[in-house]
Image (cartoon, rainbow, N blue to C red):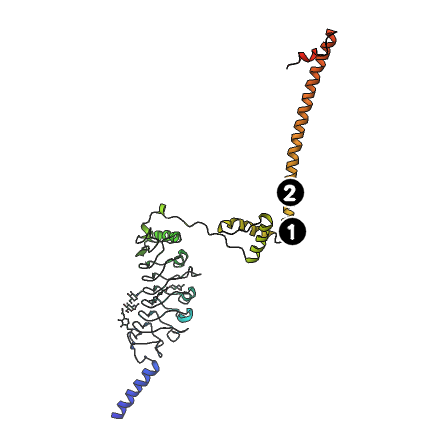
Amino acid sequence: MKGELLLLSSMIFLLQGACGCPEKCFCHSSSNSVDCSHRGLAEIPPNLPPETLTLLLQDNQIYQLPAFAFRTVPRLKTLNLSNNSLSELVPEAFHGLQHLEVLNVTQNSLLSLESRLFHFLPQLRELDLSSNNISHLPTSLGEPWENLTVFAVQQNQLQHLSRELLESMPRVRLLLLQNNLWKCNCHLLGLKLWLEKFIYEGGITDGIVCGSPDTWKGKDLLKIPHELYQPCPPPPPPLPPPELVFSQARQHDSEQGELPKSPEDHNVGRHDISECMVKPKPRPANLRHAVATVVITGVVCGIVCLMMLAAAIYGCTYAAITAQHHGRASAQTSESGKMGGKEPFDSLPA
Ligand SMILES: *[C@@H]1O[C@H](CO)[C@@H](O)[C@H](O)[C@H]1NC(C)=O
Ligand SMILES: *[C@@H]1O[C@H](CO)[C@@H](O)[C@H](O)[C@H]1NC(C)=O
Ligand SMILES: *[C@@H]1O[C@H](CO)[C@@H](O)[C@H](O)[C@H]1NC(C)=O
Ligand SMILES: *[C@@H]1O[C@H](CO)[C@@H](O)[C@H](O)[C@H]1NC(C)=O
Ligand SMILES: *[C@@H]1O[C@H](CO)[C@@H](O)[C@H](O)[C@H]1NC(C)=O
């Protein structure tokens, strides 16, 4: 009897070991949840039951997640990593979690996130990244995140949030953005417009309170009037690559004896780049100058010719009129007979 009991208990122990419930965790087989919270863990415990749907790892000191960290629990739907020591997430950490719906990574030390991270979580509905140290989020995810309805990034160091990122979340209904360092410059205009539409369509957000510049500090982005919120000027054109700068400098050197120095010269630079791209060698530039010279010479010659023509016409007309008068005068002279040589000229108007 005693021996049988011992056998039974050792069998249970073996079964537990085989089916797996990590030593420090509580496994609730009815709900397929595993609670490893507040156990002083530094990494993901081994032997997680493969059928686990909910894994609670909050309030530990987990500082890193290796790639494929959750490959033994592919059915996972809820993962709580709140209040750990994660400072980065490698994109492959969540690889294989095809069914994950809720991911809680609040109260860690994350600094940024890569867009690839999200590609491994197609079914995600709720992502909570609040209370980290995130200063950078991807500007876009590349592909839409169809099922995401809750996106929370409260209490981070964010200054910008791109409109494209939010547009990759077509179903998002709750956006928590409070307590960041939002920089309410022209770059947040896209976000402002997006949020206005979002709220109009029934979305819920706790809003954006500006952290800078001083003009808007403490103000709600959504309450700043549009008239006062200017769009960004078009970005300056990119600087030409070094070899173009060189040839451009040489060209300017020979033309004007000085180099473009300040960003105000950007337009000149762009002009030259486009020219350089069409005609990369200096020779066509000389050809261009020759053509310009010919054109200018032609125009000047044309003007001179026209002036000469006008002068000739004027001269001819004057001569003709003079001749006519002279003719009449001489006729009068011959009629009047014997008159002094000076008289005909007296009849002319002075
Ligand atoms: C975070 O976890 C630690 C144990 O690792 C615990 O002492 C602390 O109370 C937790 N903080 C919160 C806010 O739950
Ligand atoms: C995660 O753990 C925190 C406690 O640290 C709890 O308040 C929260 O509800 C949990 N979230 C999920 C999705 O389990
Ligand atoms: C994540 O956990 C925090 C507590 O650490 C809790 O306040 C929050 O509601 C949880 N987020 C989600 C989406 O369950
Ligand atoms: C979104 O969720 C539905 C229902 O759970 C699922 O059928 C669909 O595949 C999910 N979308 C994506 C892109 O995984
Ligand atoms: C948060 O990040 C800033 C730099 O971005 C750093 O100076 C600071 O120490 C970090 N804080 C924590 C709690 O990690």
Query: x and y percent of residue 259 in the render?
Result: 55, 51
Question: Looking at the picture, does residue 214 appear above or below residue 346?
Answer: below
Question: Which quarter of the picture shows residue 5?
Answer: bottom left
Mark 2 C-beta closer than 8 Å to ligand 5: no
Image coordinates for residue 92, horizontal then vertical, percent: 42, 70
Mark 1, secondary structure of its residue: helix
Q: Is residue 192 visible?
A: yes
Which residue is tagged 2?
293
The residue closer to the viewer here, 114 or 319, is 319
Judge by depth and name the residue closer to the eye, 184 or 40: 184
Front in this rendered view, residue 54 or 344: 344
Residue 196 rendering spot, x and y as whole percentages: 34, 51
Picture coordinates of residue 250, whole percent (x, y): 59, 53
The residue type indicated by label 1 comes to Arg
- Please say if 16 is above or below 187: below
Residue 307 or residue 101, whichever sits in front: 307
Q: Name the residue located 31 percent from the left edge and 50 percent from the top edge.
A: 223
Can you identify the residue that label 1 sits on?
A: 283
Quadrant containing ligand 1: bottom left
Vertical position of residue 216 compared to residue 81: above or below: above
Label 2 with label 1: CB-CB less than 8 Å? no
The residue that appears at 63% across and 46% down in the rendered structure is 289
| Disc 2 element | helix
Is residue 13 found left or right of 93 in the rendered image?
left
